[in-house]
Every structure is written in C-alpha cells, then in structure tokens.
Amino acid sequence: MRAVQVVEFGRPPVVAEVPEPVVQGPDDVVVRIAGAGICRTDLHIVEGGLEAAFQQRLPLTLGHENAGWVEAVGTGVSHVAVGDPVIVHPAVTCGFCDACRRGMDMHCGTWRFPGVDGWAGGYAELMVTSARALVKLAQGTEPATLAPFADAGLTAMHAVRRLAPFVSGGGVGATVVCLGAGGVGQIAVQLLKILTPATVVVVEPDSVRAETARTLGADAVLPLPAEQAADAVLDLTGGRGAQAVLDLVGEGAVPEQAMRMLAKGAVYSIVGYGGGVRIEHLDMINRELTLLGNQIGTHAELSELMRLVAAGRVSLATEVFPLDAAAEAMAAVGEGKVAGRAVLVP
C-alpha cells in the first residue's frame, strides 16, 4: 500500500510502498483511511524538531489526525464492526493504568502516538490502532473531512473545557483572547461561544482567517500579528486585560505578549509551541495567574465534540489533497495558504 514517510529530516516526505498492517492482538483494529489531517506538528516532524522528544527513527509514516472505516478487527473487539465509520483518537493507551481509568488517555504511562513516535500513522491507505482509540460515527457518515477533529478539534475542546472555569464566573465583561484563527482557532471560537459566556476576541492578521473568525461568532477580531497584540487587547478591555488567553501560536514574542494581556486571576492556556517566556514569580503571585499546557484531549471529549459536529453546531473548512500530493499540501500549510485544515485522501 502507499504511505507518506519521512525518510530524512529536513527534506520533504515521500510516497513509498509499504506492507499493509494486519491485526495481531485481540484489541487491534485496522482502519481504512478516508482522510488524514495535516497538522503543523507534522511540519515540525519533517524539520526534525521532535526527533529528540519522541526518539524518532526513520522512515516514519506521518499522520495523527485520522478518520475512515473499520477494515478488520481483533477477536476482543465488540463495539465496532467491519464497515463502521470511525474517527481515531490520536493516542493508543493501555486502558488499565490510573490515568486511563480516570479517562485521561493522554496521561497513560505507556501511551503511543501513531504518526509521531514511530507507530505508523494515517498518511496511508490503512493504519492499525487500538479499539480503545476509536469513536464510532453514525452510519452513512462520510469521514474524510472529519479527520482534523481528531487532533485540531480535540485539542480545542480540551483547552476550552479547561479554561472555561476562569471565565464562567467572570460575569458580564469576561474576555477570552484567541491568538490565531487557523484550524484549531476556528474550532475553538465556536466552542468558546457554546461552552462559555465570555466575549471572544480573535487576534489574526490573515484577512481570510479573520473574516472566517467573524463568521464563526467571534465578538471582535484584531487584524494584527499576535506579536503586537497586547496593547490592543488592553485598550479593548479598558486596561483590565483578558480573563483567559488561548495561545495557538506560541512562537517568537507571542508568549510575552500573551502574558502582558492577562487580567488579575487570569489563565494563560498554551497550545502552540516553539517559543517561551520568562516567568517572574512576583508577577505570578501579584496577579495570581495560572498557566495551562494542553496535550490533545480525552476520549470523552472527542465523543462530545463529534456529537456537536453531527448536530451542526461546530464546523471546519477543509481543503482536500490526494495522498500523492502530500509534500505539496504540507508546503501549502507551511506557507499559510490553507485557510482552515488540509486533508489528505488516499
């Protein structure tokens, strides 16, 4: 079968012929991929930026945002059957440790991360995962363009759920600032309007994404780079600052700007990465700030999100590319030419 692999860090991925995955254990499921979302993490992998963090060995089949149909199941699988449409949670977990039993799949001590840590991902015609990772979709669902919800959507859901307590008690005038309105940001804006009473302010310099954020319900859009956003947010809030900042950029001077725009008692919720900020303890104490890092989300959150999508309450613009054009599609994402989320279709 065809699969898109990183064979050398710093060079575009290639389409290779690899053996088809097969069921080996009782909980294994082979999924026929309908669509695989392109995440910026995939670009970082190609560049070699995650090699040390995940001890990656090449060749590596990419793809951690996956949806498709069940192709084959192990003897212990009963909640899905061949032909069922499914979306695939990014983590493969044990199901028995304390974290798994609490529903915190991404905290499993033995978790695997297909498409990232060496387990073959979904930039392919088929992939194997654990039955525990699957969320069954309604019969007749076309899963291809739903693939980005497996990570972009799940991460947004997890992050919004965690910051909601900081704004839900803020009453009239509570403000959440969303730095960036790409795929994750577009989903986050909708979830913030559904799950919190806050005024949602989006910082996005790209005119197409800015207009999309307005269409999706943002109360205000600041069309400027996140690196220059703090003063504008402070002006917009009468000097008070935001009760929450959801940082989907995380690079360069953005973290410093995010810290500046926080109100007293606020939370800085981090999704984007690549940069950093110096933490001044006295400032943290005096403003009683909270920092939250967000790593994907739980199986329950993915199930809830898919119910919202099925009900038409959350949507995402996608651009479809053939699997053989993966390198070109990833380049388009890296150059900011995809307004929402790119999806590879075998």
Image: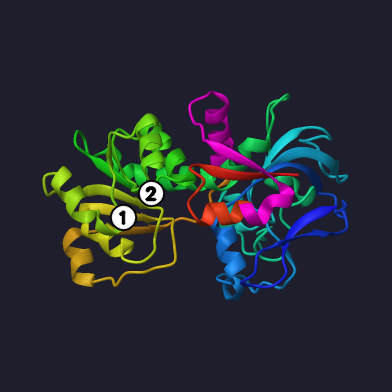
Residue in the image at 88% along x and 52% along y: 22
**246 shown above or below 5:** above
Residue in the image at 23% along x and 48% along y: 242
Judge from the rendering whether residue 75 lies leftward or rightward of residue 128; answer left or right: right
Q: Is residue 314 magenta?
A: yes
Q: Which residue is mark 2?
A: 180
Q: Which residue is mark 1?
A: 226
Q: Are marks 2 and 1 in contact (CB under 8 Å)?
A: yes
Q: Quadrant of the C terminus?
A: top right
Q: Which residue is at the front of the view, 277 or 203?
A: 203
Q: Which residue is at the front of the view, 305 or 13?
A: 13
The quarter holding residue 58 reads bottom right
Characterize the local packing of mark 1: few (<14), some (14-19) or many (20 or more) Cα atoms within 10 angstroms.
many
Amino acid type, label 1:
Ala
Amino acid type, label 2:
Gly
Q: Which residue is at the front of the view, 33 or 326?
A: 326
The quarter holding residue 57 reads bottom right
Q: Secondary structure at mark 2?
A: loop
**Residue 310: in sight, yes or no?**
yes
Magenta-tinted stretch: 300-328
Residue in the image at 28% along x and 70% along y: 279
**Residue 192: in sight, yes or no?**
no
Q: Secondary structure at mark 1?
A: helix
Question: Where does the image place residue 184, in percent across and percent down from the top left?
Answer: 47, 46
Characterize the local packing of mark 2: few (<14), some (14-19) or many (20 or more) Cα atoms within 10 angstroms.
many
Q: CA distance from mark 2 to mark 1?
A: 8 Å
Sequence-wise, which precedes: disc 2 or disc 1? 2
Question: Where does the image place residue 87, in percent across and percent down from the top left?
Answer: 67, 40
Residue in the image at 36% along x and 69% along y: 276
